[in-house]
Amino acid sequence: MLFAVDIGNTNVVIAVFDGNKIIQQWRISSDTKRTGDEYTSIILTLCRDAGIDTTLFSKGIISSVVPALIGPFVIVCQRVVKKHPYVINTNLAQEGTILPVHLSGHSSRELGTDLLCNAVSAWNLFHGANIVVDFGTALTLTATDSKGIILGGTISPGLGTAVKALAMNTAQLPFVPLEAPRKVIGATTKEAIQSGIVLGYKGLVESLVSQVKNNMHEISGDKPEDIKVVATGGLNSVLKPITDCFTIVDKELTLKGLKLISELI
C-alpha cells in the first residue's frame, strides 16, 4: 500500500492507496507549529480507527507547498511507513526526467509540486493538451500542451481566501457559506457577497480558461476546442453546478498524480 501526503497551505490531505484505489483519505489542518511527533500521533490514531494495518505500507511519498512541514511529515512517514519517503522536488519538472510532462528552463524551479502532480495526472487522463483548474487556497490554472510541455499558468486568490479577506478587512461584512445565490442582485448582505464571490469567480474562471486556450493556440498551435479542462481542489464543487467550462471534475487529481509519480521513481 502507498502512503501519500499532499501538504497544502490550508490542509494536509493524506491518502492510502491499495493498488490504484484510494481506500482511505483524511484532511487535517496545516499547522507549522505542530511537530512530527504530534502529527504521527494523529495519523496513527486515524489509521487505527479506520482499521488500516500500517505494516502493509510499502512506500511513502510527499508533495508540499509548505516547506516548514516537510520535516515533520518525513518523520511521520519514517514512523508510520517505517521507510524514508520520497519527497517530490522541482527538479522533476525539468526536461529529460522520468515524467511524461516537463517545464523547460529555470522556471521549473518555481513550479509548485502540487501543480506538477496535477499536470502528471491530467496528462495520464487525456494524453493531450489540457488545463487544470485547482480550487485551493489559491485558484490556479496550469496549462500543458499536446507535447507534454507545461507552459505555465495563472494564480489568483482562492474563493475561501477571498471570502476570508472580505470578512477580516471590513467592519460589518460577515463570513458567508460559499453557495451560488438565486439571483445576481443580492437582496441581503449574505446574497450580495455570494453573488460577488461565487458568480464573480464563475466569470473569472470562464474568462481565464478561454484566454488560456487562445494563448496555448498561439504558443503551441493546439486548437482551443481540443484542449481539455479538469477541475480539482476542495472548492471546485462551488462552481461545478453553474458552469460548463470543465471537461471533468476530479477532486483526487493531485493524489492520483502522487500515485503515478511514485510508480515512476
Image: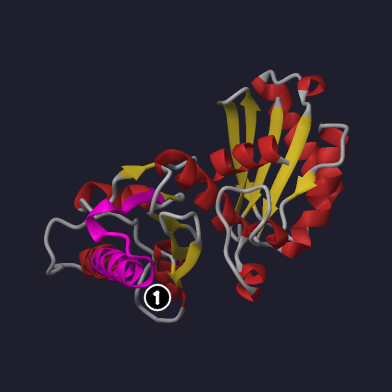
Identify the residue at horizontal 43%, vertical 65% (top origin). Answer: 158
Would you identify the image quadrant in which residue 84 lies? top right
Q: Residue at x 40, y 81 (%)?
A: 170
Determine if residue 14 is in view: no
Pick the front one: 172 or 159:
159
In the rendered image, which quarter contains the N terminus? Answer: top right
Q: Position of residue 223 (x, y in %)?
A: 26, 59
Q: Position of residue 189 (x, y in %)?
A: 24, 70
Q: Identify the secondary structure beneath mark 1.
A: helix
The answer to which of 237 and 58 lies nearer the viewer is 58
Q: Amino acid at mark 1?
A: Leu
Q: Does the magenta portion include 212? A: yes
Residue 25 position (above or below residue 214) = above
On the image, numbered disc 1 is attached to which residue?
166
The magenta-colored residue range is 203-231
Q: In the rendered view, does 246 fall on the left or right side of 66?
A: left
The residue depicted at 65 percent of the width and 30 percent of the height is 16
Q: Tell me if residue 49 comes above or below residue 75 in the rendering.
A: above
